[in-house]
Amino acid sequence: MQQIKNFINGEFVGAASGKVFDKRSPSDNSIIAQVSEAGRLEVDQAVAAARTAYLGEWGSYSTEKRVELLYAVADEITRRFDDFVAAEMADTGQPKAVMTHAFIPRGAANFKVFADVIKNVPSESFQTTTPDGLGALNYALRVPKGVVGVISPWNAPFLLMTWKVGPALACGNTVVVKPSEETPMTAALLGEVMNAVGIPKGVFNVVQGFGPDSTGEFLTHHPDVDAITFTGETRTGTAIMQAAAEGMRDVSFELGGKNAGLVFADCDFEQAVEGIYRSSFLNSGQVCLGTERVYVERPIFDKFVAALKNKVAQVKFGRPDDPEANYGPLISHEHQEKVLSYYKKARDEGATVVIGGGVPDMPDDLAAGAWVEPTIWTGLAEDATVMKEEVFGPCCHIAPFDDEQAVIRLANDTDYGLSTTIWTRDLSRAHRVASRVEVGITWVNSWFLRDLRTAFGGSKQSGIGREGGVHSLEFYTEMRNVCIKL
Ligand code: NAD
């Protein structure tokens, strides 16, 4: 049985309380690891180690030295690619191809991209006029924030954690990371990588555990954490924001979504079906950017519903390393119950179930896993529960629409504002609609295509702030102005 410990000041340590919790396989519910739950003591130790490193060795490094080390981190992840893929598959139960093509390579890229950003970022300076005519020179220094608390979710654990750790370290901060209790493995592996390439002790720390009344809350309430970056549910973000208000700590939040896909009759039909299929069902629908509300222009509505149903009918459930399988379980039984309760609600509120809606028949060795069928509904009113709340499961509702103005109103009729996809061959329409949907990112004839240099984040209740490229510097550094009288 694998034992997963906290990573504090360059050492793997258990919890002084002796507390451990089980990590179960999403595929068959077997216990695959025991994880040490960090209490207040370990969180204190991790934050103190991060502070000491920030004020000490790490703080004394030049940007070039940090950049060199972050490149080494990325290379070491790539060298241990198979270990990361295996750990992420075990934690999430998702197909190997998702790990090898997207989640692990992106995790490594997160270190290189932000190393490049910090290497090339300009500063600003202003010549100021003064009454004596000699003037003054103002210039800005970009300084790190200090100790950053990183709280990450389970749905793409390595990618989403490194997306924050990469820029935080590139900017000269130190971090204490709390991965999701559902996915402890890759954060622990990253500790090994940090030691292997010579990142000083205390720069990167991991505390394992739960959120409320546990490790996450101890970390976010810790007075010596200077800023908190969080990816997860909007409700959790509210709790963390309250914690951050003590001491006026800055926050960066990437939260939930209830994203709309807008399919116009002039689209490339096959491309739109494939795109909506991926955006609704990749990672078993557990993607914040996924599409749970699909609006299809009436002339192609029936044909579209039939085509999407046909694709969904072909999914092959199985373990992550089963070459025949392309579809995984949900992360846990708790999440399975939540998703199934939404399936029931949709039926109770009058949905037509086009396909799915339940639990698939699985062979004996997988029957205990957290499986649910990918599901398509039609016929719900716009105020139905699953049209308003994020399910975060493999499901979407498809509704017809008649004109562009109406579908923009429908897309925007939500508390969330994370992403939208638009499927059309009409370039003018694409620009028009993209400028009017109230979201952080709009994809036209594509989905999940991310250039890490661009701004990423959500509008409305989907987030606070933007990260990515130079935008990450807004959160991970502060500008300090120096004014010199000439
Ligand atoms: P979650 O909010 O339940 O948990 C996220 C993390 O917060 C976990 O590590 C958890 O232990 C911790 N946590 C929970 N309560 C806490 C508290 N009171 N104090 C401190 N920490 C606490 O989210 P989840 O279920 O892990 O992830 C799914 C959610 O994440 C979905 O809503 C999804 O849309 C969102 N998400 C958003 C993005 C984005 O970029 N916008 C990306 C991925 C996931």
Image: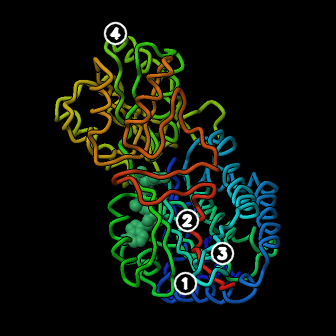
Is disc 1's CB within 8 Å of ligand 1?
no
Label 4 SS: helix
Distance between the Cα atoms at labels 4 and 3?
Answer: 59 Å
Is tag 1's residue or tag 3's residue first in the polypeptide sequence?
A: 1
Q: Where is residue 324 in the image (x, y as percent from the top left)?
A: 62, 30
Label 2 SS: helix
Q: Mark 1 points at which residue?
A: 15
Is tag 4's residue or tag 3's residue first in the polypeptide sequence?
A: 3
Question: Mark 1 against mark 3, which lies toward the viewer?
Answer: 3
Distance between the Cα atoms at labels 3 and 2?
Answer: 17 Å
Which kind of residue does numbered mark 2 sit on? Glu
Question: Mark 4 against mark 3, which lies toward the viewer?
Answer: 3
Q: Is residue 450 left or right of residue 393?
A: right
Label 3 SS: strand
Distance between the Cα atoms at labels 1 and 3?
Answer: 46 Å
Ligand 1 position by quadrant? bottom left
Disc count in the image?
Answer: 4
Identify the residue shown where x is 42% and y is 46%: 418
Q: Mark 3 points at which residue?
A: 139
Which kind of residue does numbered mark 3 sit on? Tyr
Closest to the observer, 374 or 308:
308
Circles 4 and 3: CB atoms closer than 8 Å: no
Is disc 3's CB within 8 Å of ligand 1?
no
Distance between the Cα atoms at labels 2 and 1?
Answer: 35 Å
Mark number for residue 299? 4
Crowd tier of the residue under label 3, counting other residues whose Cα lies within 10 Å: few below 14, some 14–19, many 20 or above: some
Q: Mark 2 points at which residue?
A: 474
**Which quadrant of the figure has residue 259?**
top left
